[in-house]
Structure formats: structure tokens, C-alpha cells
Image (cartoon, grey):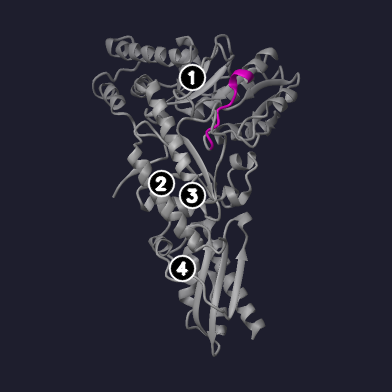
Amino acid sequence: MKKVYLDNAATTQVAKEVVEVMQPYFLEKYGNASCLHSWGQEARDAVEQSRKVIAEKINAEPEEIIFTGGGSESNNLAIKGTAFQLKDKGNHIITSEFEHPAVLNICKALGKKGFEVTYVAIDKNGFVNLEQLKNSITNKTVLVSIMHANNEIGTIQNINEIGNICKENNIVFHTDAVQSFAKVPIDVKKENITLASFSAHKLHGPKGIGALYIKKATKLKKQIDGGHQEFNQRSGTENVPGIIGFAKAVEVITEKNIENITEFRNYLINELLKIKGTALNGSQDNRLCNNVSISFKNVEGESILLSLDDKGVAVTTSSACTSSKLESSHVLKAIGLKSEDAHGTIRFTLSKYTTKEELDYTIESVRGIIKKLRGISPLK
Amino acid sequence: MSFKYSDEVLKRFRNPVNAGKIENPGGVGVVGNRNCGDVMHLYLKVENNVIKDVKFETLGCAAALAFSDLLCDIAKNKTIEQALKITKDELVKELGGVPAPKLHCSLLAVDALHKAIEDFQKKK
């Protein structure tokens, strides 16, 4: 059966080049990067070289990058680390309604520990309301955490403007850039970013490795106590093969890749919107190169997902219809989508390996499936 | 949350045998609303107090479709009294179990049948 993987916002195929550079660090160069002997030094050199690669990609200094166990850990260190470090200065945090659970749930947890959290609203096109963000700032505000690009609908936020607002008000600005990293240019200096979270497995790197950009002189309350690794910000033996693979993944992505994916994305959007009773969620401008989120009227997302899976096509529902409360996605709710439309939403996410032929097969399959499911639906 | 459907659920979801409408049905049961998820319409053909045919139209997840289809098979050729005794647990068991968040879909199917019978009795 044909296999088409269109769930690249969930995770990606690891690039062959990445696997190749990682392999020696399991079998031969397996030293602990903290050791003085040549095994250790070999690993240390490779880790520092990788740090440079990540730093250069975002115009940071190498010592401003620490490696973590992934995006969620980076978000935890950034948000909790800042909140607890600055708790004597203030207890107010600003975030948005449509953050990833890895930010929302941290903020909720802090809300139970004496912090006040403001969740800024999102407009119908999928962008954070900057006026509300500005107006929410008080003299107690210590942190603003706004994602760079949304994982469900792909909209890219104006982090330059948010960075400016935070700079003017002397507030730490954290951005969860897990979906956007290496897809959308980031310049931490120009954009006044204090902290930024990254993850390797969204860009053809391995799982279990991420990074956090920490602007020079920014103090964070350490979240994992232990040894002095990663400039004493994150204890634990460095995941050397993961770090090497992460850097390679960043190196092999080209601007041409992004251009091609964008072209394919637009093709997929245009073709799917030709099906009656469909709508694109989130603006088509300022959108991640690989994200297509479509609502199909009078069809349940899960049924589309499973039917596509039967055809060998992997996608995901944006609606969390599996939850016991049957609540639809908080992201779709935040952009004002009606619950009934949220239930019929499917996210297709492309990668540089996606081909036109795969998209044509997918479009053809979707057409047939929607026709079949609407055929047995009482609402036409 | 992730979970797996049983083969029986997937089989019925992929190839429902009772999907469709009945012309001039003896009773119709309409349950659910789109706002919270599934919508189910159940159509009955009744002769001499026996359910001769049952068909469904459902907008919903794989479990909702599978329960709809199964219910039709189970209710067919039963008397009204027998049909009223069909329980959601019986449906769940027949499908080899469903993930906990999907249990309510079985209730939806039983409700649809009760409403259709009610409608039939009103029309009688």
C-alpha cells in the first residue's frame, strides 16, 4: 500500500545524513563530554561545534545555547526558571490562549503556586492581540511567553513587535520556537528575545534532544539539580549523539527546501478548498511553510483520520475529540471556530520529503472519503 | 490521549452494512447534536410489532458509526418489547470493548433506538 506521511508537525523522519553523523558517537566516540581523557575531549569538541551551529542559526553566541531533553524541558526551564528566579520582583506572567500544552500547563501550574497569569486572546486569523498584550503589562509582570508559530494552525506571530514591547518594559521574553525553528528565520538580537525553545525531532533530527537560548546575563532557577553541565544550567550527561544529530539536521535544511514546501503547501490548500464545505484555519500569509489546517463541514475529524490511515496517509485531527470531555481544540476555539467545525478539522503537515505525487494521492483520497462520510451523515 | 479501537469497531466503521435511509419509516429517532460531537438518525420499518428493517445515518467518530451499524443488526427481527431491552453494555461487549471516552457513543445508539420506537408508537 502507498504510504504518505503528512504529520510532520508531530514528528519527522530522521534525515539519513543525521543518522550517519550520529552513529560513530554510539559505537566509537562514546566518551562523556565532561571527561579529560581523549574520549571525553573528542565528545566535548563535537558538542561545542554543534552548539556553534545552533547559535549561528539564530544569531546568538554559542555560550547562550544549552542543550536539553526537548522542547517541553526547554519550556519548563524557561518559564519556571524565570518565574522562580524573579518572584521577588513580580508574580505576573503573560502568555496566550493558544500556546502548546507544554506552555499552557506550566502556566496553569504556576497559577496554583501564587503566580498570576494573563492569557492574551487570539484574533480570527490566528494572531496574538498585541494591544491586549501591551495593556496587560503591570509593574508585577516578569515574563511574556508567546509561541513563534502555532502547532495546529501554523500562524507565525510578530515576535519582533513582542520583543520590542518586552524590551521597552524590561520584561523577559520567551518564545516557544519548536515548530518554527529552521523554517522561519530567527534573530534573537534583532528581535529582542531573552529565551527561545527548540527541538530537533520536528526538523528531521532525533527525538529527546532540544535546546534553550538564554540571553547573556539572564538568570534562571535551575530545574534539574546535579552536575555542572551546560554552564551549570542543566545537569545531566550530555546526549552527545543527539546533540550532533540536532546540529546536522539544522545544517542540512536549505532555503530551497522551505520554498518547495511552501509551494506544495499552497497547492494542497488550493486543491482541498475546491471540495465543498471546507475552510482553511489561520491566515495563509505569515503561515508555517508546511502547515495546512482544514475544516470539513458535517464530517467528524476522527473518521477522516482513520479513513485516510486506511489509505496509508497519516494526518491528525486538530480537535481533541478523544478527550473524555469531548472538548474541541483550544487553538480552534481561540480563533473563534464553532465547535461543530472544530470537530471536522484535519491538520496536514508536509516535509522536505513530501512529493507532488503524494499530495495528489492524498487529495484524491480525501475527496473520496469526504463523499463517503457525508453520504452516511444525516446532515448534508 | 491515545487509544486503539478493536478490530470489530474498525470493521464496522470501514464497511457499515446498515447505513442509509428507509422510505416512509415507521419511526425515526434523532439524537445528539453537532455542538458536542455526534448526530445519529435511526429509521425503523415495523410490521406486526416486529422490526423488519433498521437503517442509520450518523455523523460521528468511528465508535459512533460502529455502534450505529451494530445496533441495526441487533434490533432487526426483534419485537418492539425485545428491542427495548437492548442495553449499551451488550453493544460494547459485541464490539469487543471501546476506549473509555467512547462509551457514551453506545448510549447514543440505545437512545436513538428508544426515540425511534417512541416515534413509532406515537404514529401508530
Look at the picture and state if A5 lies above or below A21.
below
User: Does the segment drawn in magenta span residue A146?
Assistant: no
Label 1 residue SS: loop
Instruction: Return the residue at label 2.
Output: A363
Report the residue marked by disc 3. Answer: A275
Q: Residue B93 carries which label?
A: 4
- Classed neighbour count for the residue bearing mark 4: other residues with Cα under 10 Å, few (<14), some (14–19), many (≥20): few
Query: Which mark, by number, is residue A349?
Result: none
Nearer to us: label 3 or label 1: 3
- N-terminal of the pair, mark 3 or mark 1, is 1
Q: Which of label 2 and label 1 is nearer to you?
A: 2
Q: Do labels 3 and 4 share a chain?
A: no
| Mark 1 chain | A
- Type of amino acid at the residue the image marks with label 3: Ile
* Nearer to us: label 3 or label 2: 3
Q: Is residue A231 visible?
A: yes
Label of residue A185 in the image: 1
